[in-house]
Image (cartoon, helix red, strand yellow):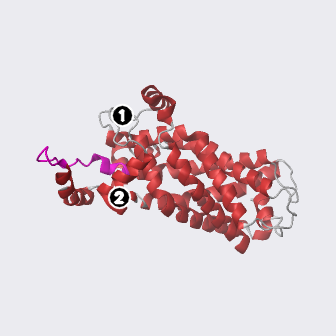
Amino acid sequence: MEASTDIINPHVHDSSRRGSPAVRAAKDITFGSAAGIASKFFEHPFDLTKVRLQAQVLDATARFHGPLDCLVQTFRKEGVRGLYRGLPAPIVGAMAENAVLFLAYGELQSLVRQIGNVPVSQALSLPQLTLAAAGAGSMTSIVLTPIELVKCKMQVQMLLVPAPASPSLAAPAAAAAAVPSAVLAASVRDLPGPYAILRDVLRTDGVRGLWLGQTGTLIRETGGSAAWFGTKELVCKLLRRNAPPERPLRPWESALSGACAGAAYNLAFFPADTVKSTMQTEAELRPETVGQRSFGAVARELYRARGVRGLYAGCGITVARSMPSSALIFWMYDGLRARFG
């Protein structure tokens, strides 16, 4: 990350001064993993809401009337634990995603610099940085798809638990309040965990089944990462346009540019994520669907069912949570880079 490093720590103009390639890789993996883990604890309830809203687009009757209704219903029926259902997979995913993403972004910048004969004293242009970011995102998608497959399946599991029947029409509220806790506790214990889901996918669809939805992840991560890093670099440059070159990037500048980057990432290619989530949860929510359908077939059905609005189901809450989450990621990552090189 030469251009970014110049801003974060102006005294480091050559990536080799950060250490050997192995040391640089270890730092990027460590810093990226730490930032990713911290962000997931904050954003997971909102990500769960997004997936559940996306998963209901093809339902004849919507389970939730919006993101707030989804959050409230989840909390009432499943408690705080329900809001964090499926968290282990995203934690692993955050470590892998951010480690690969930041590592690949830095190394691809070095490659772009070599191919373009750009001296280390000269910052890469925004198009060059965006190209490196897109390549990093495409690499990350390969790691991320199996992890997101498990996460999405776990996040919709509780939607399959039948609600207890009310014994009397006269007192449905009392019946609903009296029965669910025991029923849900038993139901949750019977739900498969991440390892059971992995085994089931491998048994049913083989290794190839782990990459169900890869096309959607590839589109989202390639375009989204280009928008993410590109926006971050652009906003950083705008914030520092009148600053002396020797002044390092301030923490609030990292956070603000990261927040803008988070919004850009999700707005850029959100429909691809909706299609991916639908594909990865069809086996649970629409078992009557025969076989695994293609990305294009699912996209067309979503568009016919709800139009553009259906393709952006859950986008509002996703952008709202991605801004502080992305701000946290870059604040931590840039801070660690400035402190430890």
Q: Residues within 10 Å of mark 1 (few under 14, many from 20)?
A: few
Q: Which image quadrant is residue 269 in? A: top right
* Mark 2 or 1: the one toward you: 2
Which residues, given as a range, are shown in magenta? 153-172
Q: 185 and 34: which one is in front?
A: 185
Amino acid on which disc 1 is placed: Gly
- Residue in the picture at 53% in, 64% down: 37
- Residue in the picture at 45% in, 25% down: 304
Predominant SS along the magenta part? loop
Q: Is residue 169 magenta?
A: yes
Mark 2, residue position: 82
Q: 236 and 144: which one is in front?
A: 236
- Residue in the picture at 71% in, 49% down: 230
Label 2 close to label 1 by CB (< 8 Å): no
Secondary element type, mark 2: helix
Q: Which image quadrant is residue 6 in? A: bottom right
* Percent position of residue 132, x then y: 71, 49
Q: Is residue 325 magenta?
A: no
Q: 141 and 75: which one is in front?
A: 75
Left or right of 32, for residue 249: right
Q: Any mark on residue 8, and which? A: none
Looking at the image, is mark 2 or mark 1 earlier in the sequence? 2
Mark 1, residue position: 291
Identify the image quadrant of the N terminus. bottom right
Image height of 301 relative to 43, above or below:
above
* Percent position of residue 65, x then y: 38, 41
Secondary element type, mark 1: loop
Image height of 179 relative to 11, above or below:
above
